[in-house]
């Protein structure tokens, strides 16, 4: 019995030493904060240095190129030559709605959810971030979609749910419908309307 206990103690000591060696080897390259983030499943975003990190930086770069006289058409033509298939951009109407800035919506199905978004617009594409709240619980969301005429097709993505909104922007307040899709493959319909519009 003593031999078995001694053998188990020796194995535990060897395992602890091996862990310390692994940790000390990695300690130079990874901080404690990175270990904690990795254990939570959080990933540090990686930004491609060739592109601006956010829309505001992109706009500043575009304005600087415009002022310096860099020919954007030549750059676009050079890029298009390297692309084998170019898809057509969505057709925009002349009186397309102004969908950008801070917008608040209510999503109604069996319950009522508050959706607050900060949206940015680039031609026929709208994107942004915000929060969705229900019964005192709030989650971060991302949003991306297209504007086609007076219709805004917007996907709002939370941790486990995608809300596919179809909004009629010709009226104030804006109204529409949505279908929600959960990670467990369940789905349900609802209605959406803008809150706080004049």
Image (spheres, rainbow, N blue to C red):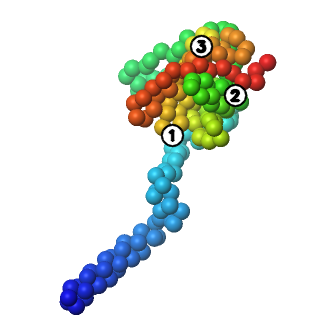
**Residue nearest the observer in this picture, 198 or 59:** 198
Of callouts 1 and 2, the N-terminal one = 2
Question: Separation of disc 1 and disc 2 at Cα?
Answer: 20 Å
Asked whether residue 51 is in view, the answer is yes
Please give the residue where the numbered disc 2 appears in the rendered image. Answer: 104
Dividing the image into 4 quarters, which one contains the C terminus?
A: top right
26 displayed left or right of 102:
left
Element type where label 1 sits in the image: loop
* Residue drawn at (46%, 52%) of the image: 41
**Residue nearest the observer in this picture, 21 or 139:** 139
Question: Separation of disc 2 and disc 3 at Cα?
Answer: 17 Å
Asked whether residue 73 is in view, the answer is no
| Up/down of 1 relative to 150, above or below | below
Contact between labelled residues 1 and 3, with CB atoms less than 8 Å apart: no
Occupied quadrant, residue 11: bottom left
Q: Position of residue 100 (x, y in %)?
A: 68, 25
Please give the residue where the numbered disc 1 appears in the rendered image. Answer: 159
Total marks shown come to 3
Please give the residue where the numbered disc 3 appears in the rendered image. Answer: 151
* Residue drawn at (55%, 39%) of the image: 51
Q: Position of residue 17 (x, y in %)?
A: 34, 80
Q: Residue furthest bottom?
A: 2
* Residue drawn at (48%, 23%) of the image: 188
Of callouts 3 and 1, the N-terminal one = 3
Q: Depth-wise, is mark 2 or mark 3 nearer the camera?
A: 2
| Up/down of 23 relative to 183, above or below | below
Element type where label 3 sits in the image: strand
């Amino acid at each position: 019995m003593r031999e078995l206990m001694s053998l188990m103690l020796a194995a535990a000591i060897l395992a602890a030493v091996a862990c310390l060696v692994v940790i000390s080897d990695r300690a130079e390259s990874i901080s404690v904060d990175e270990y904690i983030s990795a254990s939570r499943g959080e990933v540090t975003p990686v930004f491609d240095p060739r592109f601006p990190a956010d829309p505001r930086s992109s706009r500043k770069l575009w304005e600087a190129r415009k002022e310096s006289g860099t020919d954007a058409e030549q750059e676009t033509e050079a890029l298009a030559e390297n692309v084998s298939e170019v898809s057509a951009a969505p057709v925009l109407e002349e009186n397309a709605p102004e969908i950008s800035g801070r917008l608040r919506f209510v999503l109604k199905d069996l319950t009522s959810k508050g959706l607050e978004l900060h949206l940015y617009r680039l031609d026929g594409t709208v994107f942004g971030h915000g929060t969705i709240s229900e019964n005192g619980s709030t989650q971060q969301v991302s949003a991306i979609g297209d504007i086609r005429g007076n219709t805004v097709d917007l996907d709002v993505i939370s941790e486990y749910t995608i809300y596919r909104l179809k909004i009629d922007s010709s009226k104030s307040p804006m109204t529409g419908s949505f279908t929600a899709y959960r990670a467990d493959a369940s789905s349900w319909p609802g209605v959406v309307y803008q809150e706080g519009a004049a």
